[in-house]
Image (spheres, rainbow, N blue to C red):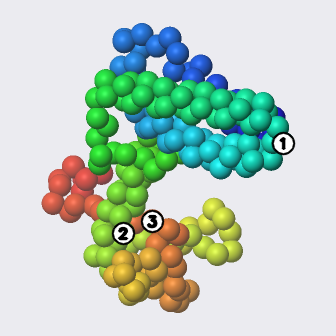
């Protein structure tokens, strides 16, 4: 048996072993996306096996070997079809996964949702920075990694998408262009609060 056919038999056996023996209670806790991926894998193995096995059958020289390989092909395809049916049955018992929270294949759902949340926060910060002209800020100096300089935003520089990523800052040494990731807004003090004024 060729190494490619061995690998296909081995892969199919692994998937078959994974899906054998699940109880109804355990099935409810399976990951739908992972199961759909296994189903796609079995379909792919089945489709790739047919031309490889046909080529192997054509290379046989006697009728006994040809008959044996045709039987092997039929057994393998029956095994694939049986496994496809079994996985489809398991999928039908699972609740549908919400489409809005579907992570791309290969990315765990928790990581995907965390990244979506971080991107949303980043977009909100970018939108807030659009209105921050003339605000007092601390800017990270280019000379020292921990040295911050006091300054005021003079101009914002929106990109082609309209989002601000660079600003011009006026410090006591002059005007500097800085990315908004290297500036930090100082907290706003409300002069109308008596407790803050008396301190």
Q: Is residue 87 left or right of residue 133?
A: right
Which residue is at a point 53% across and 69% down the rendered structure image?
A: 182
| Residue 62 shows up from this direction | yes
Dot 3 corresponds to which residue?
184
* Quarter occupied by residue 65: top right
Q: Is residue 52 above or below residue 84?
A: below
Q: CA distance from mark 1 to mark 2?
A: 71 Å
Where's residue 100, x and y in %?
29, 48
Where's residue 25, x and y in %?
36, 11
Which residue is at a point 54% across and 29% down the rendered structure image?
A: 78
Q: CA distance from mark 1 to mark 3?
A: 78 Å
Q: Nearer the viewer, mark 1 or mark 3?
A: 1
Which residue is at a point 64% across and 43% down the rendered structure image?
A: 49
Where's residue 67, x and y in %?
71, 32
The answer to which of marks 2 and 3 sits earlier in the sequence is 2
Q: Nearer the viewer, residue 198 or 50?
A: 50
Dot 1 corresponds to which residue?
61
């Amino acid at each position: 048996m060729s190494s490619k056919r061995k690998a296909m038999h081995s892969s199919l056996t692994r998937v078959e072993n994974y899906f054998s023996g699940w109880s109804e209670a355990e099935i409810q806790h399976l990951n739908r996306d992972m199961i759909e991926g296994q189903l796609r894998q079995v379909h792919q193995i089945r489709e790739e096996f047919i031309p490889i096995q046909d080529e192997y059958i054509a290379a046989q020289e006697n009728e006994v070997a040809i008959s044996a390989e045709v039987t092997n092909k039929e057994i393998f395809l029956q095994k694939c079809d049986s496994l496809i049916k079994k996985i489809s049955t398991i999928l039908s018992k699972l609740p549908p996964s919400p489409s809005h929270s579907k992570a791309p294949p290969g990315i765990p759902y928790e990581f995907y949702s965390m990244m979506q949340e971080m991107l949303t926060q980043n977009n909100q910060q970018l939108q807030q920075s659009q209105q921050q002209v003339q605000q007092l800020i601390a800017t990270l100096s280019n000379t020292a990694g921990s040295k911050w300089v006091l300054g005021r935003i003079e101009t914002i520089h929106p990109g082609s998408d309209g989002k601000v990523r660079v600003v011009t800052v006026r410090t006591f040494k002059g005007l500097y262009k800085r990315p908004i990731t290297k500036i930090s807004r100082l907290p706003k003090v409300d002069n109308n609060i008596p407790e803050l004024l008396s301190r």
